[in-house]
Amino acid sequence: MRAYELHGVNDLRREDIEKPEIPSGWVLVQVKASGICSSDIPRIFTNGTYHFPTIPGHEFSGVVAAYGEGVPEERVGKRVGIFPLIPCRTCPQCRQKKYEMCEHYDYLGSRRDGGFAEYVAVPDWNLMELPENVSFREAAMLEPLSVALHAVKRSGVKPGDTAAVIGTGMIGFAAAAWAKALGAETVFVIGRGEAKRAIAEQIPGISYVMEEESKAIQADVVVEAVGTPQAVSSAVLLARPGGSIVLMGNPSGDLAMEKNVYWRILRKQLNLMGTWNSSYEKDEACDWTEVLDALSKKKIPAQALITHCFPSEKLMDGLELMKNHKEPYCKVMVSWE
């Protein structure tokens, strides 16, 4: 099969390799679409991964091509999305089915081979069968859309609220769309430039506001989707007294907090919380089933979030676009069809 293997930092190679073996309880998925996550950029170009070589890519969808022992034969041919986290099932969090907080998890695309390849070995438990009206590209967004939903649900947003999202990456725009879908009356996306305004205008009910114009906002809930000290400070400033802030952005380094920011948290009695990944349980209600239902019913404008799609042989072009910010983008997709 053709795959992109990371052999070291900034050493991603497009190669012909053997298809993966299929352990008992696993299946072989033929990849149809892969999303490039912002976390893939440092993983590939600067930080590396847990071992080399590794095939990156944790946002993907496809068709079941083969199955291992213990998997029903009828799985073959099923169109599926894939939950990339493989829980240990033994830690306290796993015993409560809070798999997103597993202490000893494995992960497709970072700790083991993922979706930047023609085929991927996946546990049968991690498969979510797709309705016919959900495309492979939409299904490749199940993971980031679920992460965004998980964060917004953590915020406690309710009908009539004012919500603000700081950050103009795909997760930020998705969080804004979810806040609106869950009943927020007013939803702001706070950006640092005009480049992403056109993307925001594709999401119904969302207002795009420049950072310097946002200081008058008093939001019931704020989702911070950047991971910088400045973004955290802005979140504290924008939250109304008694409001909630959800920290979702992945930090690129240490974060320091100014004393005045800390004072505002105290004096405004803010609810400050973190969020991580998303809830999943096969064949049970969870973040992933909510997202799939919303995609099927077209409640979330997933297609509007896809700004670029490259054929698989041009995956490096997508990575370079994101790495060097060559042009405004939201979700960059790779097609293996």
Image: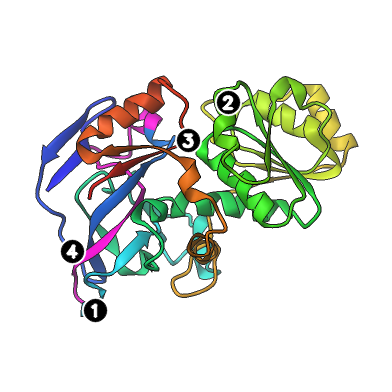
Query: Which of the two marks, 1 or 3, is nearer to us in this view?
Result: 3
Q: CA distance from mark 4 to mark 2?
A: 40 Å
Locate residue 164 relative to residue 117 in the image: left or right: right
Quarter of image, res 22: bottom left
Tell whether 21 sits left or right of 215.
Answer: left
Please, what is the three-letter code of the amino acid marked with disc 1? Glu
- Asked where in the image residue 237 lies, by quadrant, the reply is top right
Residue position marked by numbered label 4 in the rendering: 22
Tell me the residue at 74%/20% (across/down). Answer: 212
Q: Earlier in the sequence, mark 1 or mark 4?
A: 4
- What's under tag 2, amino acid-wise? Asp
Write down the residue under mark 3: 330
Residue depth check, mark 4 versus mark 3: number of the one nearer the observer? 3
Tell whether position 171 is magenta: no
Q: Is residue 1 visible?
A: yes
What residue type is disc 3 on? Answer: Cys
Which portion, as a residue range, is magenta? 41-69
Label 1, label 2: how many angstroms apart (C-alpha)?
A: 49 Å
Tell me the CA gap for discs 1 and 4.
16 Å
Judged from the image, the secondary structure of the residue bearing numbered disc 2 is loop
Asked if residue 53 can be seen in this view, the reply is no
Q: Tell me the residue that label 1 is attached to.
A: 74
Q: Nearer the viewer, residue 193 or 257?
A: 193
Residue 6 image position (x, y, % from top left): 24, 34
Of labels 4 and 2, the one closer to you: 4
Q: In the picture provided, is 317 more to the left or to the right than 89? A: left
* Pointer 2 residue: 254
Q: In this figure, which colouring scheme has been used for the structure? A: rainbow
